[in-house]
Image (tube, rainbow, N blue to C red):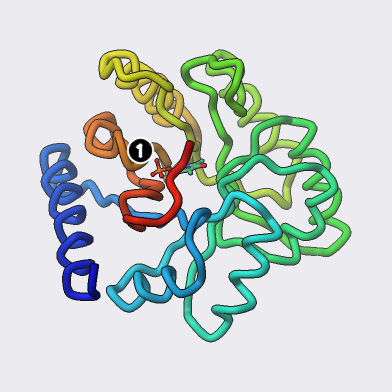
Amino acid sequence: MNQLEYKRHIDAIIEKIEAARIKVSEHHIVKIVAVSKYSDTEAIKRLYEIGQRAFGENRVQDLIAKQEVLDELPLEWHYIGNLQRNKLNALIKADPFLFQSLDTVELANALQRRLLDRDTTMDCLLQINSANEATKAGVAPEKAKDTYAYIRENCPNINLKGVMSIGAHTDDQDVIKKSFETTYKIYEELDNATICSMGMSSDFELAISCGSNMLRLGSIMFPGDRQAV
Ligand SMILES: *Cc1c(COP(=O)(O)O)cnc(C)c1O
């Protein structure tokens, strides 16, 4: 794809997002985070030139390496991956715009201690395992509200902004929809939550119809790059 074809491809995705969000409400704004985990810095630059500013990575080492190379561009970096405890300091140093995958109380407590030590804060989302899948990270739906309240009370250096969830891993649209509805219901009942991050390349229109206001789009935004397995 040359740059003009690529721009048309991205425009077509944006048109789909526009149509889906307007069905919800003219006032329903949806943000795109381009997940660049399988893409190199040249591909990120190419998408930046079309107008994309927010990018997501799922490994701290990759986040830092790409931040360094693209230092001169005004990009907004999101961290969306599982985080090992020994990578906490590196994540704080990388200072993401939003850490979307905070997924246990233990991780929140460890992050709180390190943020306090460094006298800094971090905006985060609580990841919810809305389909209760053994292979997936995240807080169980029935524990999500209590966990959210616990972090808000006990981790003053963590600014919880809402929730993140990955749609159920199935081709059954009804099951995927149910998982999005579960996440959205929790989101609606939280205090001060403004971000409901759900929807990926294969299910973003469904996610928007269920109330998502932040999409994490990987393969569809970087056609031709290595795909998720
Ligand atoms: C890889 C990834 C995405 C993007 O997946 P695509 O299907 O390529 O759009 C979104 N969210 C998370 C947490 C991911 O790890």
Question: Which residue is depicted at the point 79% across and 56% down?
Answer: 115
Mark 1: few/some/many CA within 10 Å (<14, 14-19, 20+): many
Task: Out of 149 and 197, give the one closest to the viewer.
Answer: 197
Q: Does residue 197 appear left or right of residue 112 in this picture?
A: left
Task: Out of 197 and 225, give the one closest to the viewer.
Answer: 225
Residue 185 rendering spot, x and y as whole percentages: 39, 23
Q: Does residue 76 appear left or right of residue 50 in this picture?
A: right
Tell me the quarter of the picture where residue 160 sits. Answer: top right
Q: Amino acid at mark 1?
A: Gly
Q: In the rendered view, would you say 162 is above or below 119?
A: above
Question: Which residue is depicted at the point 29% across and 34% down?
Answer: 203
Tell me the quarter of the picture where residue 176 sits. Answer: top left
Residue 11 rendering spot, x and y as whole percentages: 17, 62
Task: Out of 29 and 90, give the one closest to the viewer.
Answer: 90
**Which residue is under mark 1?**
199
Furthest residue to the bottom? 72
Question: Which residue is depicted at the point 11% across and 46% down?
Answer: 19
Quarter of the image for the N terminus: give it. Answer: bottom left
Q: In the rendered view, would you say 150 is above or below 79?
A: above
Residue 146 rendering spot, x and y as whole percentages: 63, 22
Furthest residue to the right? 117
Q: Does residue 199 appear left or right of residue 2 in this picture?
A: right
Q: In the rendered view, would you say 162 is above or below 41?
A: above
Question: Which residue is depicted at the point 19% across and 56% down?
Answer: 14
Q: Which element is circle 1 on? A: loop
